[in-house]
Image: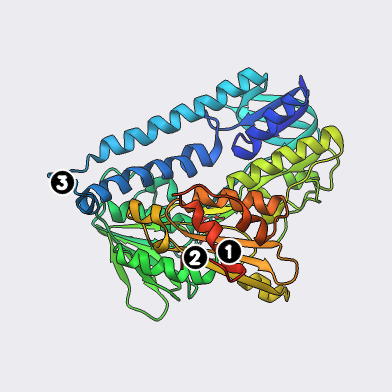
Amino acid sequence: MAKHELVVIGAGPGGYVAAIRAAQLGFDVACVEKEPALGGTCLRIGCIPSKALLESSELYHEARHSFGAHGVKVGGVELDLATLLARKDRIVDGLTKGVAGLFKKNRVTRYQGHARFVSPTELAIESSRGVETVQADHVIVATGSVSASLAGVELDGDRIGTSTEALSWPAVPRSLVVIGAGAIGLELGSVWARLGAEVTVLEYLERILPGMDSELAREAQKIFEKQGLRFRLGARVQSAKRVGDECVVEIAGAEPLHAERVLLAAGRRPNTTGLGLESLGLELDAKGRIPVDEHYRTKLPSVSAIGDVISGPMLAHKAEEEGVACVEFLKTGFGHVHYDAIPSIVYTAPEVASVGKTEEELVAAGVPFKKGSFPFLANGRAKALGQTEGRVKILVHERTDRILGVHVLGARAGELIAEAAVAIEFGASGEDLARTCHAHPTLSEIVKEAALATQGRAIHI
Ligand code: NAD
């Protein structure tokens, strides 16, 4: 029977990064993945393919609607959906093969198959070739998450689907109903709206983008509405069914909606199916997550868990950080993730990004704070780009000036937020950021000006 010091179950960003870091630290490490391609949801059917589609659809949209303002005349702009989808598939293929290359380089042993615990230190790996048993001193569960189902929504893998299907629809639907105004609903809703679909987003709450700064979320909603997305807030979906050639979506207290396709994007749930956790006596919490302590240890000394299967935001980079901290703890007794410095980005146009606390969270916790904000409209580079919507908002502690949260709605917000994450990680004050020289002309000057604004001394407004 094969034996390793460490076996990681799942080769998503949490699992494969944990395995590589473990190899760097000198562990004899293996990674079990049930799919033929490595990379998990993020690389295969999540972050990466959706970003490829977002990029291509934005170029198509810009060629039709924005190039003219730059004096660039383009006639006969046509969509070649097959090429667009094939490009996305090539990107995914290259990156997943890249992870396989990294495993080889770092001598991470790879098992393909579905892992199930036989005991706290023994796994049965089932594949088309049969069942193989592997022993491990320690096991890290990094099996990620899957789309959550919704009562009454009849997923048929075709007209009524999840993000997985919506990454590969072979034709642009005339009409699309998106259930859920979180990251997935807004990103994929934007893709298909840009490509020509009439998109209606149904959201149960009275706001979009739960968890993000509510003021910026309201501003974002107005911008998305101008782009053609329709929103129905406070809409509780009761059912979605295929009736003949169309889909019918029933909403509590309102007329049903009819659409060619439905995308269910109402959250994800931890993926622990078939792991055999119950046989180990490992109980899940009320949300189906694996309970762990601050060092990612379950109540069994030989089993840890990281990423979407434990509590916290379901984000690839959060899982990566946990994977590193988990194996560093196993090796050295130290390993830490600073959860207030984990950025979150929604890749719409413009992007929405945030790190640290929101105003709502600070108010609820009774933390006294000051805020400063600065609009893209007053920034030279944003004007040159022709992307002047949105702003940066910075929250600092009223007495200590420590940066508590940074929220960005605007072009390239996803890149701008990195500076804010570094500032929070280093415990910077608003003044530190305001006194740091930012190159001109760049969008990063908006961050500096927002920091100056927390002190009531922004220059360009
Ligand atoms: P989400 O939880 O972010 O949003 C789901 C939305 O659906 C919520 O606003 C919720 O109120 C709404 N909803 C739930 N039930 C509903 C109902 N019956 N009717 C109408 N609306 C309903 O989930 P998501 O967008 O599916 O994303 C899942 C996870 O994946 C999240 O943790 C998200 O952060 C992560 N993700 C992140 C990114 C990114 O970072 N760019 C991209 C995709 C997914």
Q: In this view, does 414 lie to the left or right of 284?
A: left
Which mark lies nearer to you, 2 or 3? Answer: 2
What number is the disc on residue 374? 2
The residue shown at (73%, 45%) is 277
Residue 284 appears in the picture as rendered:
yes
- Where, quadrant-wise, is the N terminus in this rendering? top right
Residue wearing tag 3: 73
Mark 2 Cα-neighbour bin, 10 Å: few <14, some 14–19, many ≥20: many
Mark with earlier residue (2, 1): 2
Mark 1 Cα-neighbour bin, 10 Å: few <14, some 14–19, many ≥20: many
Q: Is residue 343 above or below residue 5?
A: below
Residue wearing tag 1: 452
Res 354 quadrant in image = bottom right
Looking at this view, name the residue that lies furthest to the bottom. Answer: 253
Res 55 quadrant in image = top left
The residue shown at (45%, 50%) is 412
Q: How far apart are marks 3 and 1 (CA)?
A: 40 Å
Q: Is residue 83 above or below residue 460?
A: above
Q: What element carries label 1?
A: helix
Q: Is residue 369 above or below residue 323?
A: below
Q: What residue type is labelled 1?
A: Leu
Q: Distance between the residues labelled 2 and 3?
A: 33 Å
- Contact between labelled residues 1 and 2, with CB atoms less than 8 Å apart: yes
Which mark lies nearer to you, 2 or 1? Answer: 1
Q: Which of 399 and 279 is in front in this view?
A: 399
